[in-house]
Amino acid sequence: MTAQLEREEARAPEVEPSGSQAVRALLRLRELVLAGDLPAGARIAELAIVDKLGMSRTPIRAALMRLEQEGLLEALPNGGFAVRTFSERDVLDAIELRGTIEGLAARMAAERGVAPVVLAEARACLDGIDALLRASALEGEAFSRYVGLNARFHQLLSEMAGSGTLARELERVVRLPFASPSAFVVLQAETPQARDMLVVAQDQHRQVLEAIEQRAGSRAEAIMREHARLAQRNLHEAVRSHDMSRMPGMRLIRQRS
């Protein structure tokens, strides 16, 4: 949470006019939505949120507007906001969009070239993941470490493209709870068969970094598009198992009747 808060505070001028209080309101409201503490589809009672978080209405309103921009809330016709729900197709499309943007980032990185120091940091991330995957299971601190390294590698891919516009669009997409690179890691780590996907994902990490270093733009793009499809497969598994409680935000996905 500390790293996330630091990233939000670094973007504070884009988020709201009232400084870190609105950043904290944004983080807390997002947690409430993803945890299911705010009922999906019901109108959000602004005053109740003010009382719950102990903040003034100004940062709460700024946070509500930001979450609407992220897609977690929807604006109601008569004013106010409600928590959105998503179909399985919505989620698949969000993951596909992430793969498309990350693929573009990888291609641009390959074509434009990447500073050696950034490539070295990316390799260090992957070395760390390799060390973790030598264990038979990811538990406790090892699991948290994997999530951090995986997120950092994907962030470095975005930075490698050297495009602020692309980075902002990618950040917008991964705000959705099921579209982030680590959204389905819980499922991937808990059974030997599912964990095999982590090994496949890591091999794709190595391949895309190699393609970028070799300036093979089309290959780098294709690998990242395929990489996102692993998450789509894991979504199908999560929905099919009906075990939605282990993953943040999965309660927002509408179940088929």
Image (tube, grey):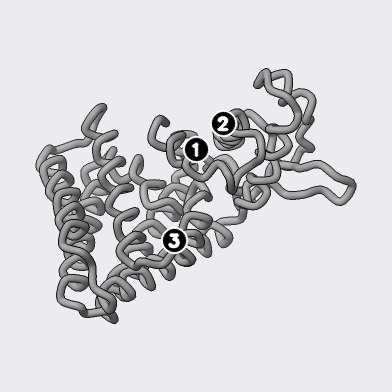
Q: Residue at x 33, y 44 (%)?
A: 185
In the picture, the disc for residue 44 is none
Q: Which residue is mark 3?
A: 167
Q: Earlier in the sequence, mark 2 or mark 1?
A: 1
Nearer the observer: mark 2 or 3; the answer is 2
**Within the image, what quadrant is residue 154 found in?**
bottom left
Q: Secondary structure at mark 1?
A: helix
Q: Residues within 10 Å of mark 2 (few under 14, many from 20)?
A: some
Q: Residues within 10 Å of mark 1 (few under 14, many from 20)?
A: some
**Marker count (numbered):** 3
**Within the image, what quadrant is residue 132 found in?**
top left
Tell me: residue 104, above or below residue 138. Answer: below
Residue 97 in the figure: left or right of residue 198: right
Q: Dots 2 and 1: beta carbons under 8 Å? A: yes
Residue 210 seen: yes
Q: Amino acid at mark 1?
A: Glu
Q: CA distance from mark 2 to mark 1?
A: 6 Å
Q: Which residue is mark 1?
A: 9
Q: Amino acid at mark 2?
A: Ser
Q: Residues within 10 Å of mark 3 (few under 14, many from 20)?
A: some
Residue 230 at x, y percent in the picture:
34, 59
238 vs 17, nearest the viewer: 17
Nearer the observer: mark 1 or 3; the answer is 1
Residue 39 in the figure: left or right of residue 216: right
Residue 39 at x, y percent in the picture:
69, 34
81 vs 124, nearest the viewer: 124
Q: CA distance from mark 2 to mark 3?
A: 23 Å
Q: Secondary structure at mark 2?
A: helix
Residue 56 at x, y percent in the picture:
73, 24
